[in-house]
């Protein structure tokens, strides 16, 4: 009698990662009223993972010595991060005016807010802390943030999510420049739902 060999099952660290449902790469544009020549390029790679987590990779390239970038600190929640260099994401739905805002500082500090409608903040803060990784090398500052699935708007199909990507950059002299996917108004306003213009697409193929 021939014994059939047991199938080989690789250990967890050798298993391939689950591919994301949707991936996007976006370049952020500076508002014309707040130019900053020290920034050469600012873009964001975004992926919605199969387990519902949202991962964002911010890449800021430029003359970093001319910018004010906070040193690493205790990764705790903090307010008013947008007053200095800060990476942001806004997540809303096509079907409701409510949305959520997340701020990530190079220090490792972060903030999460919920709004019922335009700039109407409510106390129901999104649950869960983001996972942050920060790297500074030469002329490149990179920050990766992963939000748990519970932090995204509840009861919203993936195809109805709308995402706004933005960044505040502080120059060494304290000037602030504002970067986003779009600037639909005359003044910088990351809360403007018209700038929530990255749509999460359906998976290209099943797996």
Image: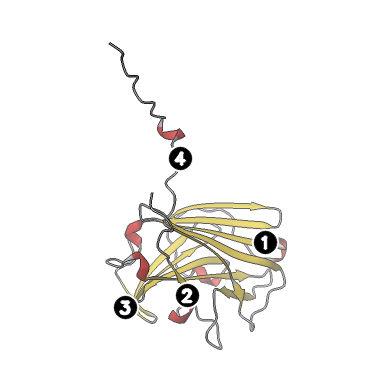
Towards the viewer: 176 or 205 = 205
Residue 132 in sight here = yes
Q: Which mark is residue 96?
A: 3
Residue at 72%, 63% in the rendered image: 63
Q: State the image coordinates of residue 132 (x, y, percent, origin top left).
A: 48, 53
Label 2 crowd bin: few (<14), some (14–19), many (20+), radius 10 Å: some
Label 4 crowd bin: few (<14), some (14–19), many (20+), radius 10 Å: few
Against 26, residue 76 (above or below) is: above
- Badge nearest the viewer, 3 or 1: 3
Q: How many marks?
A: 4
Mark closer to the chain start, 3 or 1: 1
Left or right of 180: which side holds 91? left
Q: Which residue is mark 4?
A: 16
Q: Split into 4 quadrants, where in the image is the N terminus? A: top left
Mark closer to the chain start, 2 or 1: 1
Mark pair 2, 4: CA separation:
31 Å
| Secondary structure found at label 1 | strand
Q: Name the residue furthest front.
A: 1
Mark pair 2, 3: CA separation:
15 Å
Q: Which residue is mark 2?
A: 197
Left or right of 160: which side holds 63? right
| Secondary structure found at label 2 | loop
Q: Which residue is mark 1?
A: 61
Residue at 44%, 49% in the rendered image: 19
Mark pair 4, 1: CA separation:
30 Å
């Amino acid at each position: 009698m021939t014994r059939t060999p047991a199938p080989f099952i690789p250990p967890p660290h050798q298993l391939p990662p689950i591919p994301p449902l949707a991936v996007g790469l976006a370049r952020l544009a500076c508002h014309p009223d707040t130019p900053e020549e020290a920034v050469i390029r600012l873009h964001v790679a975004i992926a919605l993972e199969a387990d519902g987590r949202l991962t964002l990779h911010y890449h800021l390239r430029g003359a970093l010595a001319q910018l004010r970038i906070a040193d690493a600190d205790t990764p705790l929640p903090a307010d008013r991060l947008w007053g200095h260099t800060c990476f942001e994401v806004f997540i809303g739905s096509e079907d409701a005016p409510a949305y959520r805002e997340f701020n990530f500082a190079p220090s490792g500090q972060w903030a999460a807010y919920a709004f019922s409608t335009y700039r109407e903040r409510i106390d129901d803060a999104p649950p869960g802390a983001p996972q942050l990784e920060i790297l500074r090398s030469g002329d490149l500052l990179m920050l990766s943030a992963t939000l748990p699935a519970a932090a995204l708007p509840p009861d919203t199909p993936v195809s109805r999510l709308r995402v706004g990507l933005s960044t505040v950059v502080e120059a060494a002299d304290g000037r602030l420049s504002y970067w986003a996917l779009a600037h639909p108004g005359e003044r910088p306003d990351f809360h403007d739902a018209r700038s929530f213009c990255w749509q999460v697409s359906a998976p290209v193929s099943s797996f």
